[in-house]
Amino acid sequence: MSSFLTPQICYAAAIIGAFVTALSQILLKTQANTTGNKGFFSKFLNVRVIVSYALLFLTLAINQVALRYVPLSVMPCITATSFVWVFVMGALILKEKVSPRKALGVAIIIAGVVISRL
């Protein structure tokens, strides 16, 4: 098993984990955007929410595998990109408005990742 886990695969797993985290957040956002008076528990016990949390749990497992070769100092930089992915997918998939404040927040995240890797 460990011969399969090369540094390249672990880095790819970390990046995929950040993307999967963003997908789960988009699913949670779509559920939050739905309206209805089906009751308190139906807001939390439905397919979108359960799949979203399952994806987040999967991301935890992916990150544990990725940490085999990805240094602990690099992993937060990779996981921070999930916020950028949520921003992009929110604009493209959910048609969310791209406000200057959101764009500034994403720019700060990207700048932080770049500065931390210098």
Image (cartoon, grey):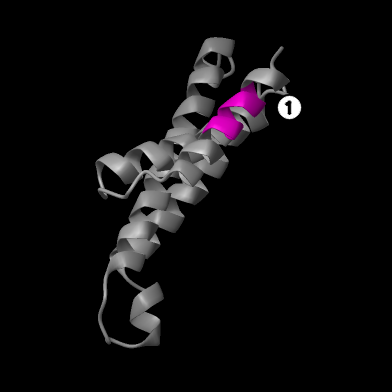
Classify the position of the N terminus by image quarter: top right
Q: In the structure shown, which secondary structural element does the residue marked by tag 1 occupy?
A: loop
Q: Which residue is mark 1?
A: 72
Residue at point 31%, 42% (across, down): 91
Q: Residue 92: where, in percent of width, then height? A: 26, 40
The answer to whether residue 100 is above or below residue 48 is above
Q: Quadrant of the C terminus?
A: top right
**Type of the residue with mark 1:** Leu
Left or right, 77 with reference to 27: right
Residue extent of the magenta highlight:
107-113
Which residue lies most toward the front here? 100
Q: Which residue occupies the foreground of this view, 107 or 42?
A: 107
Left or right relative to 75: residue 51:
left
Would residue 96 be seen by someone viewing this image from the given angle? yes
52 or 6, which is in the foreground?
52
Image coordinates of residue 14 in percent, x first then y, are 53, 27
Above or below residue 7? Residue 25 is below
Quadrant position of residue 79 = top right
- Residue 52 percent across, percent down from the top left: 40, 55
Which residue is painted at 39% across and 86% down in the image? 40
Can residue 69 be seen? no
> Is 112 one of the magenta-colored residues?
yes
Q: Main secondary structure of the magenta part?
A: helix
The quarter holding residue 39 reads bottom left
In the displayed structure, 30 sits above or below 90; it is below
Q: Residue at x 38, y 63 (%)?
A: 50
Q: Is-magenta flag for residue 22?
A: no
